[in-house]
Amino acid sequence: MAKRQFKAESKRLLEMMINSIYTQKEIFLRELISNASDAMDKIYYKALTDDELVFNKGEYFVKVAADKEKRLLTITDTGIGMTKEDLEKNLGVIAKSGSLAFKTENESKDGHDIIGQFGVGFYSAFMVSDEVTVISKALGSEEAFKWKSKGADGYTIVAAEKDTVGTVITLKIKENTEDEQYDEYLEEHRLKAIIKKYSDFIRYPIKMDIKEQRPKEGSEDELEEFIEEQTVNSMVPIWRKNKNELTTEDYENFYAEKHYGYDKPLKHIHISADGTVVYKAILFIPENTPFDYYTKEYEKGLELYSSGVLIMDKCSDLLPDYFSFVKGMVDSEDLSLNISREMLQHDRQLKLIAKNIKNKIKSQLQSLLKDEREKYEKFYESFGRQLKHGVYSDYGANKDVLQDLLMFYSSREKKLVSLNEYVDRMPEDQKFIYYAAGESIDRIEKLPQTELVLDKGYEILYFTEDIDEFAIKMLMNYKEKEFKSVSSGDLGIESEENENKSEEENENKDLFEAMKSVLSDKVKDVKASKRLKNHPVCLSSEGELSIEMEKILAQMPD
Ligand code: ADP
Ligand code: MG
């Protein structure tokens, strides 16, 4: 039996695969199970147009079994199988996808659920095994064949015995080395966990014989072992279910199962998009700030699935930084399974999904603010700072998305108010949105500069966080009303006072000059002010920076 060589480029690709494309070895199982699922889908799609062919759902499954002693792992499916030519074509040439060809042939509406299209997934088996054997019997064929390979040096194909249609793939699992662990791929519980993680939502049952214990009959405390065939995957993912079928508790369970957080989600967003981009998503807004949220360690991102198969744990391209607190997952049929991180970044489809998701999150937060005020305040307490950072970063590019979501403490309401609420109740003669910056609400209330504005009956927003004023400077205005610090030189309410100001200033000229020379480099000027009532003196600033901002900037390292 002559050994056949992989095509030259295939050889190189195989080396590359094994060494670099996949960072986690465990995904080999995901790839083989996806292929099995595709193979069963192919019978399903064929049956749609072929009257002779009946598709009994109960006959289709994947079975995963490990033999520790022999170090063998087998993955069996009842799918469409491969002829000798198929084995040659699809497994003999790397980057040749029979599934892609199937989809192209059945272009119409059929086959869109089939996962494969890149033709490299199968070879990931060599990351964990020294030798791979594929025995397959194709639908409509009397003969079965065995394909066998030890990796880059080629493969053989011979006739084989197999009664039923389908494919059995056997991996000879590598021995442990000093740096690499392979034994785990023969451990039932580890295999089960890998299947759960990546292939939970494959539409066919994935079965395993699991060793369990039960009380021995006729005995109180003795246990006996027994083997039970279990379906490991849950098959129908919650995001494919209809919203009306699901309760808040279902979403909360999903949030907990997925370890998105230890808290309960404040709000869930279930998206089923059918427009220019087709995808499903379940997103959560957590209630509490994760302990590492405002640190460099925090990693944003959503889980990304392609037709129910996990491709990435944390796809950061799906979330803008200012919504980095959002947890959840996205499933799209339009993404390929073996897509690399680099390729994903440029994927048009993914960009559309990201944009879509951003808008959904924004509108959900807006309705939370409108309809569930208490929840929104809770949310804002946890993540408001991130929104303000979002306004400030990227030179204000995102201010349109974020400005309606901002809240600040109000002198009038003694609680958080949105900019919209502030502007809505402004008296007609009020020209600016006033704010006062300080270390705490208490201290701001004592600021002499607030007196005139409050006396006028105007509301003041209190800025207690460093980022507040920076964010506002980036906004510049809201609904055409400019922001004005109460300590700025011109408050826009002193017009009537200006006339007798010069008089007063002339009278006290000497005094002011004397004060100025004493304070020399500490102040730029000393002027008479009508702004004060209970306080004899206050500081004010002209130009761009407020006193508070100058303080912050002065603290920053050069
Ligand atoms: P992809 O799934 O992206 O097409 P793979 O390398 O995973 O690439 O598989 C290559 C091809 O081999 C598949 O397209 C399919 O035609 C064939 N194949 C692999 N596994 C099976 C299987 N279990 N049953 C039938 N055909 C299979
Ligand atoms: Mg595949």
Image: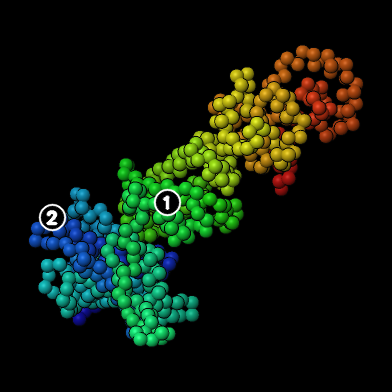
Residue that appears at 58% across and 37% down:
407
| 141 to the left or right of 120 | left
Q: How many labels does the image show?
A: 2
As shown in the figure, which amino acid type bears the numbered disc 1?
Answer: Thr
In the rendered image, the vertical position of residue 376 relative to residue 183, given as above or below: above
Q: Earlier in the sequence, mark 2 or mark 1?
A: 2
Q: Crowdedness of circle 2 by 10 Å Cα count: few (<14), some, many (20+)?
A: few
Nearer the viewer's eye, disc 2 or disc 1?
Answer: 1
* Picture coordinates of residue 141, whole percent (x, y): 12, 70
| 386 to the left or right of 80 | right
Which residue has dot 1 on it?
A: 248
Residue that lies at the very extreme toward the left in this rendered image = 52
Q: CA gap, disc 2 to disc 1?
A: 41 Å
Residue that appears at 73% across and 14% down:
496
As shown in the figure, which amino acid type bears the numbered disc 2?
Answer: Thr
* Picture coordinates of residue 52, whole percent (x, y): 9, 61
Q: Can residue 325 be seen in this view?
A: yes
* Picture coordinates of residue 371, whole percent (x, y): 48, 38
Residue that appears at 74% across and 27% down:
451
* Circle 2/circle 1 CB separation < 8 Å: no
Foreground residue among 360 and 473: 360
In the rendered image, the vertical position of residue 218 relative to residue 487, given as above or below: below
Which residue has dot 2 on it?
A: 49
* Picture coordinates of residue 475, whole percent (x, y): 58, 33
At mark 2, the secondary structure is helix
Foreground residue among 220 and 487: 220
Residue that appears at 50% across and 40% down:
372
| 52 to the left or right of 168 | left
